[in-house]
Image (cartoon, rainbow, N blue to C red):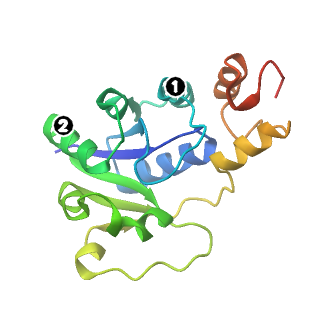
Amino acid sequence: MSRIGVFGGTFDPVHNGHLIMAQETVVRLKLDRMLFVAANRPSHKRAPGLVDVEHRIAMLRLAIKGNRCFEVSRLEADLGGSSYTVNTLEALHRTTHAELFFLMGQDSLEEFGRWLKPDRILELARLVVIPRGEKDMPSLSPSLRRRVIYVKPPRIGICSTEIRRRLKRGLPVRYWTPDTVLRYMTRHGLYGTGNRRR
C-alpha cells in the first residue's frame, strides 16, 4: 500500500515554509508522494480577501515544479463550496486506496475536536502535526494520541499572513516564496503587487 501525505490549506500564497514542511514530512515518514490540496473556501476560519482558488492552484504548481514527490490536487476546488477535510479524505480514500497522512499545524490540532466528523477523519488518516514555535503540545485523549505523529521541521518564521502584510506595505518578500510564485503574483496583481518589482 502506498503512503500519501495530504497537505491541505488556503496557500494564500504558498511559501517556502510550506515546501520545507512538506519535504521534511516526506523524508521522515517515507511517503511516496505529498498532495497539496488548496481549499476552495475554508470552512473553519474567516478568510476575507482570499485570492481565487485558481490563482492559488497555479502558484502551487509553480512552487512544486521539479519535485517528483509533490503533486497538486484540484479536489476541493472541483467540489466547490466550503471545504471540509473529511470530504477530501473520503474522496482520496475511495480513489487511491493508500495509507493517508494528513498534515496540519499545531494550532489546527488544538481546534480539531470542532472540525466536521473528527472521528471519521481519524479513521481515514493519521494526523501529522507540525509544532508551532515553543508552544507546549496540547494534552490529547488516548484515541487521538494513537493517531498523531509529530514532525518538527527546521524553524522557518514565514507565514502567508506576513507575506500579504509585507506586500501591502511595499516591502520585499523575495526568498520568502519561490521566485516563480513571486513573478506570478506580480503579473496578476495579487496581494496589491500590481506591476511593482519584488
Q: At x 52% / y 25%, what residue is drawn?
A: 65
In the rendered structure, which amino acid carries the disc numbered 1? Lys
Residue 90 visible in this rendered orientation of the protein:
yes
User: Quarter of the image holding residue 147?
Assistant: bottom left
What element does badge 1 sit on?
loop
Per the image, the residue denoted by label 1 is 65
In the rendered structure, which amino acid carries the disc numbered 2? Thr
The residue nearer to you, when weighing 74 against 180, is 74
Q: In the picture provided, is 138 more to the left or to the right than 191?
A: left
Give residue 156's position: percent from left, percent from top: 66, 56
Q: First in sequence, mark 1 or 2: give its number.
A: 1
Q: How many marks?
A: 2
What element does badge 2 sit on?
helix
Q: In this view, does 93 lie above or below 154?
A: above
Report how far apart the C-alphas of labels 1 and 2 lie in the structure.
Answer: 22 Å
User: Quarter of the image holding residue 32?
Assistant: top left
Q: At x 27% / y 42%, what residue is drawn?
A: 88
Per the image, the residue denoted by label 2 is 96
Q: At x 75% / y 29%, what residue is drawn?
A: 192
